Amino acid sequence: MKGFRSINCWPSIRSMLATFVLVVGYCSNGSAAESLQNLYYTTSAPTGGVTIFTAKEIVTMSPVVKSATAVAVRDGIIIDVGKKKDLLKRFRNAKRVTVDNTFSGKVLTPGLIDPHLHFWLFALVANAQFITPADWQLPWGDVKGVVGQQAYMERLKELEAGMDDPDEILFTWGYHEAFHGKINRATLDELSTTRPIIVWQRSVHEFFFNTKALEMLEQKEADWQGKGESSAMADWKEGHVWEKGLYLVMEKLLPVIGSPEKFKLGLERARQYVHAGGLTAASDPGVQLPESMIRQMISILEGGPMPFDYYLIPAGNTLYELNGKDGNKAVAAARGQVQRLNGRRVKWLPNQIKLFTDGAVFSQLMQMKDGYLDGHEGEWIQSPDDFADSAWAFWKEGYQLVVHQNGDLGMEVCLNTLEDLLNRKRRNDHRFGIHHFAYSQEPQVKRAAKMGANISSNPFYIHVLGEQYSKVGVGPERSEVMVRGRTVLDEGMRLSFHSDAPMAPARPMLLAWSAVNRIGLSGKNVLGPQEKVTTEEAFRALTIDAAYALRKEKEMGSIDVGKKANFTVFEENPIKADPMKLKDLAIWGTVFEGQQFPIKKANKRSVMVSPEHQERMAVLAKDEHAICHDHHDHHGDACTANRILQAFAALQED
């Protein structure tokens, strides 16, 4: 092996051998695969720079070595996995071998992966005061959930009273009418006529302002009139803008909430927050930021400890619109975009694109085949025709499509489009990704499986929305089986979990807990128990199958030879843990490319189902008006707000 390692092409040969071992492992029984991995290292050890991490237990998620107690790392890459005594014997002749027993009493797993979160958007949210229905555990301070209009207003008053500077803006995020009742400009003026107050709604697609905030932003009633769809999505009297109404205020608002100083602090907080969930990789689908903000992200994130990979995927719908709905020009624009401004950790995923079907689940604007019980209608983010046209433009050029879908009618449009794409140009291993996956029907899942699609779902929906939507708008028959899990896996599909942060906390083990237990926000009801997944299946959805969704399974997702030395360090084995305790499992920190990154503040618990939370939900249940869908007609979500905010960020560059 010493002679073999002196060959210049060794890295590529090593990668080829590692890949061969993995492929054989997937096709063979465990013992045969394990013997192949051991065969790779039965000769002399590398000449130096080897670290052997020992652990009480190593959960590999690998078909090659099922479990281990030691893993050898060189230059940030895994070079061997097995028992401690075997690795020490194997590397006895190597120079500079370090045996690291830091984790001898802990459990190593593959580094956790989130294939869909909005990191830069969370960076903006991180600068706000959180007033949300559910609890949030943040590295800079925990936040208790608030439910009920009176409780919400009391929390606003408490925050305002605690501010020393009379001119400081009270900027909050997390308001949701279904949990907090109605607010408007008059409500906020009652709180203060001298301090600017800005309330950012939970799904980040609407804002409320008091009069002082409108004055600070130099807004006049005439400015909100005669602007077409934007004016139709704004209410001057109420101090309220939503969806495209954001265009009316964003030129003045973005420099306030997203100034370079605040964006820098938000990015640093977001980096700390994402790492605190045990993540070692995350993808942000639908990014269309100006170059100055991307440069700032790369500079700030990579200027300090950056313990995870942050991948960007272009917003195909925005590129399609900006190029006059010319699909070929949109593809050219996407190609040019991903070739620029790549850092070492912050970088674009090549040949992947984000597209949209229907509206937001948090706003009940997903498109449903059988409509809504109260008669309101959903909406399309991209019209079915535009979605199909833009999908073909990228599909024919070999792109992997990441599609935002929430309703079962949105799912139908996804599947009809995929079927048409395959008929026009058959592709193998296309990995058409259906993301969010709030509502679907069993025949649709079967159809998706036959066409080779994969699912990345947000299991938090079933926990936070399942009970409420069973009562209002959708009904129990459909809402109790939100975010199907068992049906997907039984059809042989790949299933990954994502947070869509800030739509859900960027806490992978909370997602696993939601999918395994399917417990509603009250903590009392199990919703759609037939759709539960096992803990091991849930953990696959956070590791190897999440890596598959990113087309990164050869680099991460399991503890295998040739992959990055990315590990999440648990105090106990998450697969063997009590399923009800998954969201509360303590995480020591991570190892990223062989380097240790302890979490500064322990991630002790995530959310909900505390007695206090059940009491808050009881308050909500008494207020039927609070859960009525009598809102305005146009909502977006994190993804659509992402698009609008990015458009105005681009204007600042001009």
Image (spheres, helix red, strand yellow):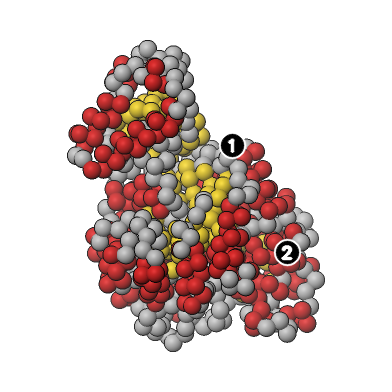
For the N terminus, the image quarter is: top left
Residue at left offset 27%, top offset 36%: 64
Tell me: 53 left or right of 533. Answer: right
Q: CA distance from mark 1 to mark 2?
A: 31 Å
Q: Which residue is mark 2?
A: 651
The type of residue carrying mark 2 is Leu
Above or below for 23 versus 232: above
Q: Residues within 10 Å of mark 1 (few under 14, many from 20)?
A: few
Tell me: 537 left or right of 601. Answer: left
- Residue 28 lies, in percent from the top left, at 21, 40
Q: Secondary structure at mark 1?
A: loop
Residue at left offset 53%, top offset 56%: 313
Give the image quarter of residue 127.
bottom right
Which disc is residue 305 wearing? 1
Residue at left offset 77%, top offset 56%: 165
Q: Which residue is more in the foreground, 615 or 226?
A: 226
Q: Secondary structure at mark 2?
A: helix
Give the image quarter of residue 611.
bottom left
Tag 2 or tag 1, which sits nearer the N-term? 1
Give the image quarter of residue 457.
bottom left
Identify the residue at the far front of this view.
Answer: 425
Above or below for 141 versus 199: above
Residue at left offset 43%, top offset 27%: 10
The type of residue carrying mark 1 is Pro
- Residue 638 lies, in percent from the top left, at 54, 64
- Residue 462 lies, in percent from the top left, at 38, 65
Contact? badges 1 and 2 (CB < 8 Å): no
* Foreground tag (1 vs 2): 2
The answer to whether residue 279 is seen in the rendering is yes
Above or below for 303 versus 86: below
